[in-house]
Image: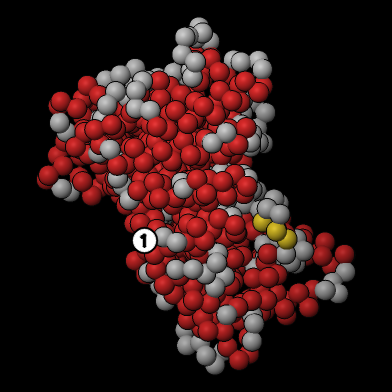
Amino acid sequence: MDSLNKKGKMTSIFNTTPPKTINDMVMDQMCNNPCCFFCIMKEPDTSLRRSGLATCFKEMSVINRDDQQHVLVLSGLWNIAMAQPDDPEFISLGIFDCMVSLLEKGTNDRSWLLRDQNIYIPYYAAHVIGSYTMNKVEFAEKAVLAGVIPPLMELLRGKISWVEQRVSVRALGHLASYERTFEAVAAYEEELVRLTMNLASTCLDQVYTKFVGVKDDNKRSKYHCDLLTRGVGGLEMENRKAEEWASQLQCWSLYLLNCFACKERSLNLICNQGFLVDLCGMWGGLVNHSSPAGVGLIRILCYSKYGRQNISESKQVLENLCHLSRSSDDWQYMGIDCLLLLLKDIDTRYKVIEIVTMFLIDLVELKSLGDRSNMGENITKTLLLDYKQSKFRIKNSHVLKALQQTWELKVERRKREKTMSVEKIEEKRVLVNLIKQQANHVFWLGDVEEAIKMYNEALDTCPLKLRKERMVLYSNRAQCYLLLRDPDAAIRDSTRALCLSNPTNAHGKSLWRRSQAYDMKGLAKESLMDCIMFINSVTTTTTNKRVKIPYYAARMISKQMEATWLFVNAQSKFTRSDDDYEISSNEDDHQLECDEMTRQMMMMMMEKKSIASGEHLLDI
């Protein structure tokens, strides 16, 4: 369908009013057409209405006249399917046969597709199929019997455009998720998996070059604009919805691949090293935060021996999982799960241990993460598995030292402190507080290295049960490392402080310090997540009515949102290309988009909350 956007004579096809909503159509006056869908829907007699709808669906499948009404009916059916996906009435009356017929017309008869508003029909037809197969396996079975898979595959192959690919991969994902319909989808297994992998890897570039990056309104596909915004809104809304749809296209593609990976099917294709690296960059983004995206598929692969073997051979994938495990991302637990699965497999343990140990040791004092308890204990047991034997198999002295420190902290020290009396603990608390105050004083005098030594002494003295005191000490030491421009040490200490906080990842100053440290290392996504969590932590503790975001936090969010923008890689590719000057030349437009996204994100986080201004270097 690319040619539709380039030939002037085709433009009139798209310069039509957007399809009406179901509410508009139901309010229309009665007409004289005995097969009018909207008139039939108003029929009070149930048997007459059902008979009329069955006839309507059959006539839509075979009659080519009155194509304009087809679009209106499909738009209405789309609204109904979205609102009532579990209603069996239309299913029993042959709606799937009707949708199949319309899809086949759209993919096989180009002259029909370009007539009137028929260009909208394949999108709506595939969307209706996807909505009705979303929740009920019996609906999915009827869809398969009606023959929905072949025309959906045509859309997935890119027969029309990325907009239709989005709804086709959604529908195929639903069909593949049921045991009773999986094999019908798997009949196309190799082709489908290859197509879907390619779609997941390239869809952002595709949406950017064919839509978002096209700044001239007249060169954008008109029917895409109408579908995205339902005919309401300008360029800004179109771009916002296109970003949302592109993210959904990628995440729904990954969901379809998950259906095969869960059954350990086509792992030889999915575990391609290049694709595994691509998965690390697929995170859903702020526009699709409910999907685990790439890490969700990586975790599924880690449950299979073949998947673990391939993941263990990619340093880039391992490092991404490690960064995720030490983040405030909602999917942090998935990163930890993947690393533990790799460590528990004897065939991959010693391939990954020298990389992952240096990250996981910072999480050994983690109590809970969401609804998961004893996370730190599980991490400790996995790290120290065959500890004495592993010392002879690990060559890296830093890793050996880290494991030794973990053993000392979680085994030897815990054993020593187990019998410590309450009076002794209180005595230690007083001493630790004294050392901390001296360290704070030295810090303010400018001797940061000496302050670190004193915080070390305080941590060695502080009993493990005094979690809050240990949290503050780690956090203050992280601030020292920040001033010394040592981001790795700052990340380690702030992560340990966040593990000790209650609830986990709730200590605002540690979040802000780690956000800065991640920024130093160029880890924009991790920095952004921590900064957002920092602002949220402040909003929940303030009682002021006036909302005021600290300038330094607003600046960090703005910077990292631009760096993590869904289309940032696509834009950079075409910025470097002399052939795409029009797409890449308007830097101001992109900056305005990022500024608007930043403003909206801040407003969302600030809702009826207040933020105290000012930045404090150390905890008291």
Please say if 199 is above or below 133. Answer: below
Q: Nearer the viewer, residue 536 or 548?
A: 536
Q: In this view, does 198 lie to the left or right of 4?
A: right
Q: In this view, does 264 lie to the left or right of 68?
A: right
Q: Position of residue 481 (x, y in %)?
A: 48, 60
Residue at the image position 84 percent from the left and 72 percent from the top: 420
Residue identified by numbered label 1: 191
Please name the amino acid that badge 1 sits on.
Answer: Glu
Please say if 547 is above or below 160. Answer: above
Q: Nearer the viewer, residue 361 or 591?
A: 591
> Do we see residue 268 in this rendering?
yes
Residue at the image position 36 percent from the left and 20 percent from the top: 66
Q: Nearer the viewer, residue 315 or 202?
A: 202
Residue at the image position 49 percent from the left and 76 percent from the top: 306
Please say if 317 is above or below 26. Answer: below
Q: Name the quarter where the N terminus is drawn.
A: top left
Q: Where is residue 520 in the image (x, y as percent from the top left)?
A: 40, 55
> Do we see residue 327 in this rendering?
no
